[in-house]
Each structure stands twice: as C-alpha cells, then as structure tokens.
Amino acid sequence: MHIDIITLFPDMVQNYFEHSIMKRAQAKQLATINVINLRDYSANKHKKVDDYPFGGGAGMVMSIEPIAACINALKAQRTYDEIIFLTPDGEVFNQPTANRFSSYKNIILLCGHYKGIDERARELFVTKELSIGDYVLTGGELAACVVADAIIRVMPGVLNDETSALSDSFQDNLLSPPVYTRPANYMGHQIPEVLLSGHPIKIADWRHEQALQRTQARRPDLLK
Ligand code: 6GU
C-alpha cells in the first residue's frame, strides 16, 4: 500500500513512521509512506497556504489552491482508492474501517489545521472524511498517524505470529485479556496460576473468559 500524507507539519508525521512496526512494514516493502509538505505547493511568494474566512470570524482557513495543486500532482502519478480528509466532523474511524482500507493500493490522508480547509476542497477532492473520536485536536496530523498505523498493522505480512492482529482488542468485538511476564511473583503479587499450568486449552479458556469479563465491565456496548 502507498500512503501519501499531506500536511503543513511534515516533521510531526514523518517521525512516527520511522519506528517499530511502521518502520518494519516499510522495510519489508509492504507499505510506503510519503509525507508531503503542503507549503511546497503554494504559488505565493511567501509560501502562504491560508487566508481569512469570508464573512469574518476567528481563525484562518486553508486555501483551496495549494491543496488542489498538491492533489492534482499526486493524481497524475497514481489512481487513489480514497482521498481522506481528517476532521472532527467526519465519520468515526474504527477497526472494521481499518480492516477494509488495508486492502487498498493507494490512499491520500489530508491533514487540516487552523479553522479548517476551504469547503470547496472537500467537495472537489475529498472522497472520505474521518474523525478519530469525539474531541478536538489542533490538527489532523495525529489522526493521520492513527489511521495509517491502524491500517498498516492489519495488512498481511506486517505482523508475525507473535504480534498477530487477530488477538487485538476489537478484532472479535472483545477487549484483550490481561497479560503478564516475569517475575511470576512481584512483591507478593502472583500471576494467575493457570498461566503456569502449561495447559494450552485451559489457558485459552481462561483468556477468553477474562476477555468477556473485561468487555462486560468496561465496554458492554461491544457485546450487543
Ligand atoms: Cl481527524 N482532526 C482534528 N483536528 N481533531 C480531531 C480529529 C481529527 N478526530 C478527532 N478529533
């Protein structure tokens, strides 16, 4: 999968993909992440990318011209499955959406900042609007990292057996069970005995039961 991320703050985004599983997915050539500085597409001599809102009001609005120039340049190179704008008024992103997008070949993630982007950029270029939850962030950058991470980690070959996404919380609408590592006794706090039993079926049953209990206690909405 190829992901183009358009942002006014490329460093904020770039660093995230240079670590851990995101780094490994790129090393294995399963994903390519291309972070684009929107300012490079400003035709303005001061590299201006925003302006005052028509009708007045607080905050600046990202202009359509640099967004259009950038997306048109990208579209000349590839066909995109989806051009996604990260915005708190978008559809709330979740695991099924991440799973579905993981089969796409090319996507664009467009990060807004300030008061938002000119509505015509949304109408003319954006095919999908995503939010990562009901709270407001300063910009779409964190959201773009969240969405790209969730998509990439479920792509075939990205995770190995040990880190398999199949046991993630939400994959089966259950939260994950508790996990423990050595020491088995930390200042009198013992791990559950069953995990030392060497009995894989008993351990699997215990984990499933814990997952159910945890989901019932914390997220009963997932069990409906
Ligand atoms: Cl996608 N963007 C911003 N700015 N805030 C958000 C968000 C996105 N999702 C939740 N809050």
Image (spheres, rainbow, N blue to C red):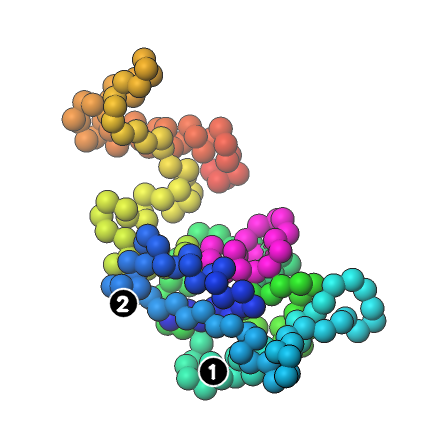
| Position in image of residue 138 (x %, y %) | 62, 56
Query: Residue beneath label 2, please?
Result: 29
Which segment did they paint magenta? 129-146
| Residue at point 35%, 55% (across, down) | 19
Labels 2 and 1: the sequence-earlier one? 2
Location of residue 46 (image quadrant):
bottom right
Q: In front here: 182 or 89?
A: 182
Q: Horizontal and vertical percent for residue 218?
A: 50, 32
Residue 151 on image: x %, y %: 40, 59
Residue ID for mark 1: 75
Say whether residue 192 is visible: no
Answer above or below: position of 189 versus 95. Answer: above
Camera-side residue: 151 or 58? 58
Q: How many numbered marks are there?
A: 2
Kind of residue indicated by mark 1: Lys
Q: Quadrant of residue 9?
A: bottom right
Q: Is residue 54 visible?
A: yes
Cα distance between the residues tagged 2 and 1: 22 Å
